Amino acid sequence: MSDGNKIHSDDPRSEKELATDLILESISEGVFTVDHEWHITSFNRAAEEITGTPRDEALGRCCWEVFRSTMCEGDCALKRTMEDGHSIVSSSAWIINNEQQRVPIGVSTAVLRDSSGRVIGGVETFRDHSLVEELRRELRDVGRVGEMVSHSPAMARIFAILPQVAESESTVLVEGETGVGKEVLARSLHQLSRRAKQPFMAINCGALPDNLLESELFGYRAGAFTDAVKDKPGLFAAASGGTVLLDELGETSPAFQVKLLRVLEEKAYQPLGAVEQVPMDVRILAATNRDLAAMVSAGTFRRDLFYRINIIRFTLPPLRDRREDIPLLVERFIHRMNSRLDREIKGLTPEAMSLLLGHDYPGNIRELENIIERGFVLCREEEIDVAHLPPELREKSTAPASSGIRFAVHNSEAESIVTALERNGWNRLAAARALGVHKSTLFRKIRKYGIILPEKDGRNR
């Protein structure tokens, strides 16, 4: 048997068998094998951790006694593989661990053959998907991931697959206009990944010339150039085990793109002044506000690099296309700034919220955050009002009240509220009854969405 990473010289098994054992003990997936009688013949460390069953208790027992899986009751993936010889990849199931807890897993199976090719049993690998399921529930219930919040259908589609993408090691390309939160999405991917405890580092590729960009990423050796008096590690070394975001990748030169492609292909880089390559252990994420596909067609971005980084692509919608998120974002920014500045701002007046809902935000989320920060600087009351907003927004405050109402109608819930109010002559109690909510809930949502009510509200009808 193996002891840590050492192999006892008197072990009767072959060197190949011992090496296989070391590999199985080092991986994060659970692995077990069975014979034709379904008795467990091997059980690795990860299988012990996921099931909570020690190896000594698992060996020799029937697999269904250890796993008590939903598959065991009917459609067993391993049984199907043993019968028809076809492997199964990433089938979903649940097991019951030794603490009687349901654990979601992803299962892959294959037949186990001896050196002569004879089938001697089956092998199953399984991965604990508890974190992924927890994240899915959280995202489905509250529309939140990391620092990102949204009620937008477009963002919901991104949130739905973010856990799986984060779990992978694939390169991800994040596209979107300036200020939409590309770096926030990249940080969320890092925080949800297995690399979360390691560094996350970002670099603006468009802000540096090639020589400085290479120096920052790859580092350099002493003597590489005049001022290089000692070795300096680059971001790839400093972020080892973690994630590096290459922001504004579309601004880089063709010469740098060639070098980056080689780094991604070989998973190694060469510091300036070095003669040997250094292995690279970082996950690469890329972000750009340019349309890289159009740049490829125009010949201004390398086609081979584009296809290398375009394994998974997220396109973040601009804020003007997800106005339903404005109240959510405002609430988050106010909470953050209250904590940072020791203030107690409660929110925005309905008039101020209406103007925010009607603005197009060329600067996207970053512009909205700056608007709220300005409000904090100028506001000395409990609520940020129109007077505290930038001049270009205040000019819209002369619009008729009905226009203010329509500014708020940018998501289904707000539209339903306005429709119910209109049908009931702006009688809020009657509208609340029609919507099936308590009147205090309706009042809170009216304020949340910045719906401006007319002076005559029909309460006497």
Image (tube, rainbow, N blue to C red):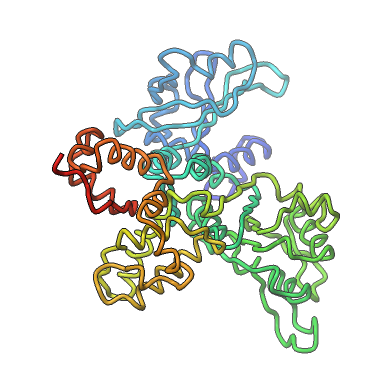
x, y (%) of residue 435? 26, 34
Q: Where, quadrant-wise, is the C terminus in this rendering? A: top left
x, y (%) of residue 411? 42, 43
Q: Where, quadrant-wise, is the N terminus in this rendering? A: top right
Q: Residue furthest left?
A: 460
Observer-nearest of 356 and 281: 356
Please name the residue shown 29% across and 35% down the image: 423
x, y (%) of residue 366? 50, 65
Q: Which residue lies furthest to the top in this view?
A: 83
From what the image shows, is residue 53 above or below residue 231?
above
Left or right of 81 on screen, residue 196: left
Left or right of 187 on screen, residue 341: left
Left or right of 280 on screen, residue 383: left
From what the image shows, is residue 26 above or below residue 127?
below
Observer-nearest of 402 and 126: 402
Please name the residue shown 67% across and 40% down the image: 15
Determine the image quadrant of residue 23.
top right
Left or right of 317 on screen, residue 345: left
x, y (%) of residue 329? 40, 57
Labels in figure, total: 0
Observer-nearest of 374 and 185: 374
